[in-house]
Amino acid sequence: MLVTAAIAVPQGFVPSQAVTRALAIISADSLRGNLSFIASDLLEGRDTPSRGLDIAALYIAAQFRRAGLQPAGDDGYFQTAKMLRVSPAGEAFDLRLTNGSRTLTISRDQSAVVSQKSLDLSSVPVYKIANPAGLRASAIRGAVVIVDAPPERFRLLAQAAAALQPAAFLETAVDDKGLELPRLIDAAEEHARFGDAPRLIVRDAAAVKILKEAQAGETGITVSIKLPAPTAVPVTVRNVAALLPGSDPALRDRYVLLTAHYDHTGRDSSGVVYAGANDDGSGTVSVIEIARALAGARVHPRRSIVFLTFFGEEEGGLGSRYYTGHPLFALAKTVADLNLEQVGRTDSTAGPQTSNATVTGFQYSNIPHTLQRAGELTGVKVYETPNADEFFDRSDNQTFAEHGIPAHTIVVAFQFPGYHETSDVWPKIDFTNMARVDRMIALATVMLADSPDPPRWNAANPKGTRYRKARTVR
Ligand SMILES: [Zn+2]
């Protein structure tokens, strides 16, 4: 198939005077100043959740406020996420499964519990539901319930079962790679699915076998559990969001996102700080700086621009997933996401990267062409990295791509010395280069927001097919 719409931007595009002036505002000193705070030891590595993370969020909001951008969250610039922090069960934990004459004791490392209260269940029958016919109130009330259904039917079935007040839900781990229980769970989603019932997850191979082989309905299996203290504790974390309203009445309810994650991995057990200056303090301060520059322009781009920084990327895209689960602007009207990662260090393990930038999923959509054109106008070479597709699903852009929104991560260096180590500190950043790269990104953001046609997935590239199919009509 011939892709005639490969270039979303008219040939010969020349930025207006207003845009050129806005780009000139982006400065190395401003980036350095902001990053020296965001990546300071006093923010303790911005773990999710932590006081350092909260202070970083407050600082980002203050910078958006200073720039005169509109608050776009549910609480000013904050999108407040009520989460459950899940910690491992303590020493006194005891979980047993009895099937006929056989009793299995399941160890702490072979199980996980999501519970907001202590538990003491003794020989409670396990009841398995495979379809709505199994929703018998008398069997479910006070029982331990297994919902045996594919993902598309699981939620409704679990909700219906939760309404009948089981003692707990019981699940088997999906694979043997380990218990992939996240440290943080969306509290509203957990409550919507399981009500107030606790959730037991086991991966012990013998237990998994018994539970999988058990017939639907009364299984004849019983569960006993002692859990002295809650394992799930409510915490609040925040995405930070600001809006630059579009200037075209016909397009201002369409949105281009500029995103980065502001969290990092915190401290180790001896208190040593992982400052995360390049990952992803650099993306965070770039979002702040580009927001500041574009907010000052006399003429706004036609579509609206949303500046977003996320918590919990290091925990697996938690902040961006929270956003798409509770979107501040309709996802069907969101035309693109430019996500920034590691845009500060030029000492890539692949060699020096001055005046260079690259992008994940280069052939997945026509956005990289816009970045290239913006790079030609700002002195940055935007190039295709052969193995960059491997990185496509390793940052928050993936969350938006799964919703069909053309979304890429822009980086200067995929790999650099000290990645996820204590040596990722702000004095190692090349701020002059970062300012140049940020001008390219700012211009590309404007070009995407101004373009007559929204960006498109590349229909000729099979790797982008699943994302293209996820696109809802807008
Ligand atoms: Zn990162």
Image: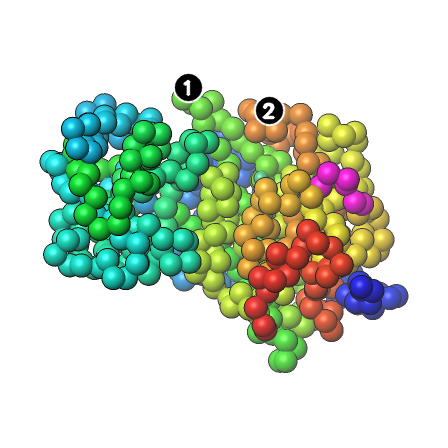
Residue 106, compared with residue 252, is above or below; it is: above
Which residue is at a point 83% across and 64% down the rendered structure image? Answer: 2
Residue 57 image position (x, y, % from top left): 46, 47
Q: Please tell me which residue lies in front, 94 or 294.
A: 94
Work out whether mark 2 precedes mark 1 in sequence or the reverse, and give the earlier one.
Answer: 1
Q: Residues within 10 Å of mark 2 (few under 14, many from 20)?
A: some
Instruction: Name the residue type under label 2.
Output: Ser
Q: Please tell me which residue lies in front, 392 or 233.
A: 392
Q: What stretch is highlighted in magenta?
A: 383-388
Which residue is at a point 39% across and 34% down the rendered structure image? Answer: 179
Q: Which disc is residue 270 wearing?
A: 1
Instruction: Name the residue type under label 1.
Output: Ser
Q: Please tell me which residue lies in front, 147 or 19.
A: 147
Residue 27 image position (x, y, % from top left): 70, 47
Q: Are marks 2 and 1 in contact (CB under 8 Å)?
A: no
Visible in this render: residue 367? no
User: Is residue 386 one of those drawn in magenta?
Assistant: yes
Which residue is at a point 26% across and 50% down the rendered structure image? Answer: 216
Q: Helix or strand or loop: what does disc 1 sit on?
A: loop
Q: Which disc is residue 423 wearing?
A: 2
